[in-house]
Image (cartoon, helix red, strand yellow):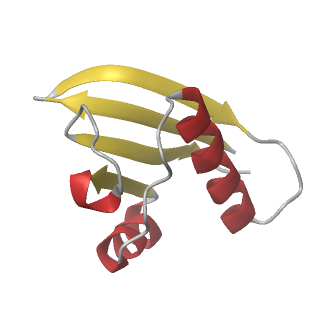
Amino acid sequence: MRIWARQFKDTHMLKDSLIVDESTETRTHKVFKALEKVCQEMDLAQPVWLDRNVKDFKRSGKVRFFKDSFIEEIPFDYLEFQIIEED
Protein backbone atom coordinates (compact mmCIF):
# COMPACT_ATOMS: atom_id res chain seq x y z
CA MET A 1 0.00 0.00 0.00
CA ARG A 2 1.23 3.49 -0.85
CA ILE A 3 -0.18 6.55 0.90
CA TRP A 4 0.58 10.14 0.01
CA ALA A 5 0.21 12.93 2.57
CA ARG A 6 0.43 16.61 1.62
CA GLN A 7 0.15 19.91 3.47
CA PHE A 8 -1.58 22.75 1.62
CA LYS A 9 -1.80 26.48 2.25
CA ASP A 10 -3.62 28.79 -0.17
CA THR A 11 -3.76 26.02 -2.82
CA HIS A 12 0.03 25.52 -2.69
CA MET A 13 1.62 22.30 -1.51
CA LEU A 14 4.05 23.02 1.33
CA LYS A 15 5.25 19.51 2.25
CA ASP A 16 4.57 15.98 1.19
CA SER A 17 5.41 12.48 2.31
CA LEU A 18 4.98 9.08 0.69
CA ILE A 19 4.50 6.08 2.96
CA VAL A 20 4.95 2.56 1.59
CA ASP A 21 3.66 -0.34 3.69
CA GLU A 22 4.15 -3.85 2.34
CA SER A 23 3.21 -5.61 5.58
CA THR A 24 0.41 -8.15 5.84
CA GLU A 25 -1.58 -6.09 8.34
CA THR A 26 -5.16 -5.03 7.69
CA ARG A 27 -5.97 -1.95 5.61
CA THR A 28 -7.12 -0.09 8.72
CA HIS A 29 -3.90 -0.81 10.61
CA LYS A 30 -1.82 0.29 7.63
CA VAL A 31 -3.76 3.56 7.35
CA PHE A 32 -3.38 4.40 11.05
CA LYS A 33 0.32 3.49 11.06
CA ALA A 34 0.89 5.62 7.95
CA LEU A 35 -0.87 8.61 9.51
CA GLU A 36 1.21 8.21 12.66
CA LYS A 37 4.41 8.08 10.56
CA VAL A 38 3.40 11.14 8.54
CA CYS A 39 2.66 13.14 11.66
CA GLN A 40 6.05 12.21 13.14
CA GLU A 41 7.85 13.22 9.93
CA MET A 42 5.97 16.53 9.69
CA ASP A 43 6.17 17.19 13.46
CA LEU A 44 2.38 17.31 13.89
CA ALA A 45 -0.03 16.10 16.51
CA GLN A 46 -2.24 13.38 15.07
CA PRO A 47 -5.55 14.69 13.75
CA VAL A 48 -8.87 13.51 15.11
CA TRP A 49 -11.01 11.45 12.73
CA LEU A 50 -14.31 13.31 12.59
CA ASP A 51 -17.41 11.60 11.13
CA ARG A 52 -17.07 13.46 7.83
CA ASN A 53 -13.40 12.39 7.60
CA VAL A 54 -14.33 8.74 7.98
CA LYS A 55 -17.13 9.08 5.41
CA ASP A 56 -14.85 10.78 2.85
CA PHE A 57 -12.08 8.25 3.35
CA LYS A 58 -14.38 5.25 2.98
CA ARG A 59 -15.92 6.72 -0.17
CA SER A 60 -12.80 7.86 -2.03
CA GLY A 61 -9.66 6.70 -0.21
CA LYS A 62 -8.81 10.35 0.38
CA VAL A 63 -9.41 12.66 3.32
CA ARG A 64 -8.62 16.26 4.19
CA PHE A 65 -7.91 17.12 7.80
CA PHE A 66 -8.71 20.79 8.36
CA LYS A 67 -7.84 22.92 11.39
CA ASP A 68 -10.83 21.58 13.35
CA SER A 69 -9.31 18.07 13.26
CA PHE A 70 -6.16 19.18 15.08
CA ILE A 71 -5.88 20.02 18.76
CA GLU A 72 -2.87 22.28 18.21
CA GLU A 73 -2.66 25.27 15.86
CA ILE A 74 -1.37 24.28 12.40
CA PRO A 75 0.55 26.55 9.99
CA PHE A 76 -1.33 25.32 6.89
CA ASP A 77 -4.93 25.05 5.69
CA TYR A 78 -5.29 21.27 5.56
CA LEU A 79 -3.49 17.94 5.46
CA GLU A 80 -4.57 15.70 2.60
CA PHE A 81 -4.12 11.98 3.14
CA GLN A 82 -4.69 9.69 0.16
CA ILE A 83 -4.25 6.04 -0.74
CA ILE A 84 -2.61 5.97 -4.14
CA GLU A 85 -2.04 2.22 -4.43
CA GLU A 86 -3.55 -0.71 -2.55
CA ASP A 87 -2.25 -4.26 -2.25
Residue 35 shown left or right of residue 82 in the figure: right
Residue plotted at (50% across, 29% down): 42
Residue drawn at (30%, 74%), measured in percent from left and top? 52
Q: Hey, which quadrant is residue 68 in on the image?
A: bottom left
Q: Say whether residue 3 is left or right of residue 58.
A: right
- Which image quadrant for residue 27? bottom right
Q: Which residue does the image show at 40% across and 62% down from the upper left?
A: 60
Q: Residue furthest right?
A: 24
Q: Is residue 54 left or right of residue 76?
A: right
Q: Is residue 70 above or below residue 22?
A: below
The x, y position of residue 31, in whole percent, is: 63, 56
Quadrant where the N terminus is found in the figure: top right
Q: Is residue 10 above or below residue 74?
A: above
Give the answer, above or below, for where 81 lies relative to 59: above
Residue 19 located left or right of residue 52: right
Q: How many marks?
A: 0
**Residue occupying the far front of the picture:** 72
The extreme left residue here reads 10
| Residue drawn 67% across the image and 67% down it | 28
Q: Nearer the viewer, residue 15 or 47?
A: 47
Residue 13 percent across, percent down from the top left: 27, 23
On the image, the x and y values in percent for residue 85 come to 60, 43
Residue 45 vs 13, above or below: the answer is: below
Q: Nearer the viewer, residue 66 or 61?
A: 66
Q: Residue 24 or 10: which is nearer the viewer?
A: 10
